[in-house]
Image (cartoon, rainbow, N blue to C red):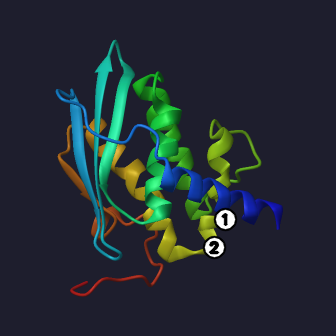
């Protein structure tokens, strides 16, 4: 019960007071992320210098889970190497889809508050969207989605119209 309460408090805090909210004037990397299932639509912009995430920001319209995930993600990856940021992307995705045991060895730290999302398949996409968008930005992709080939929960039975 304590974990659920902490999860709710963290989501509410980061939703009301998102960290690194806004945009960068001249980012070295940027991408747009869309979750057509629920309408989350965000942009992540960052400046990479000497293979490190020197600055990062996000903005857009999204649900509380997506906004909190983006807020915590930007705080966690700022100052990290690109390789460390990519490792966090993979670990976060693994944790929220159930393929990574959050109690084992990982680099997630306070991000493990999102572990319970794995039990809510329709919300996994909300939590993962910022991370997908960061990954896209780091790979010079201008946009990404949580549907089709990029679905973090393939075979979940969650589909959008037209799929």
Question: Residue drawn at (48%, 63%), measured in percent from left and top?
Answer: 64
Question: Residue drawn at (52%, 43%), measured in percent from left and top?
Answer: 72
Indicate the secondary structure of the residue bearing disc 2.
Answer: helix
Circle on res. 94: none
Q: Quadrant of the N terminus?
A: bottom right
Q: Name the residue under label 1.
A: 116
- Of 24 and 95, nearer the camera is 24
Please state the horizontal and vertical placement of residue 86, each as a whole percent of the image. Answer: 44, 36
Residue 105, relative to residue 99: is it above or below?
A: above
- Of 4 and 153, nearer the camera is 4
Q: Residue furthest front?
A: 16
Residue 51 located left or right of residue 94: left
State if disc 2 and disc 1 touch (CB < 8 Å).
yes
On the question of residue 89 being in view, the answer is: no
Please state the horizontal and vertical placement of residue 112, each as a whole percent of the image. Answer: 66, 50
Residue 86, relative to residue 62: is it above or below?
A: above
Q: Which residue lies furthest to the top in this view?
A: 50
Residue 134 located left or right of residue 13: left
On the question of residue 84 being in view, the answer is: yes
Question: Residue drawn at (50%, 71%), measured in percent from left and top?
Answer: 123
Residue 67, relative to residue 50: is it above or below?
A: below
Q: Mark 2 points at which residue?
A: 119
Q: Quadrant of the C terminus?
A: bottom left
Mark 1 crowd level (few <14, some 14–19, many ≥20, 10 Å Cα): some
Indicate the secondary structure of the residue bearing disc 1.
Answer: helix
Mark 2 crowd level (few <14, some 14–19, many ≥20, 10 Å Cα): few
Question: Residue drawn at (62%, 57%), measured in percent from left and top?
Answer: 114
Spatial CA distance of label 1 from label 2 is 6 Å
Please state the horizontal and vertical placement of residue 90, each as a whole percent of the image. Answer: 50, 45
């Amino acid at each position: 019960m304590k974990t659920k309460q902490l999860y709710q408090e963290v989501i509410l805090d980061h939703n009301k007071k998102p960290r690194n909210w806004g945009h960068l004037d001249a980012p070295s990397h940027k991408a747009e992320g869309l979750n057509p299932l629920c309408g989350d639509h965000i942009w992540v912009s960052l400046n990479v210098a000497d293979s490190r995430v020197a600055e990062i920001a996000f903005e857009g319209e999204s649900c509380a889970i997506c906004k909190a995930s983006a807020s915590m993600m930007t705080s966690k990856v700022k100052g990290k190497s690109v390789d460390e940021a990519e490792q966090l992307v993979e670990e976060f995705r693994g944790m929220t889809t159930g393929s990574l045991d959050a109690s084992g060895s990982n680099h997630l730290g306070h991000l493990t508050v999102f572990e319970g999302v794995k039990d809510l398949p329709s919300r996994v996409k909300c939590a993962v969207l910022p991370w997908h968008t960061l990954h896209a930005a780091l790979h010079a992709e201008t946009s990404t989605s949580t549907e089709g080939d990029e679905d973090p929960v393939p075979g979940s039975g969650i589909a959008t119209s037209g799929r």
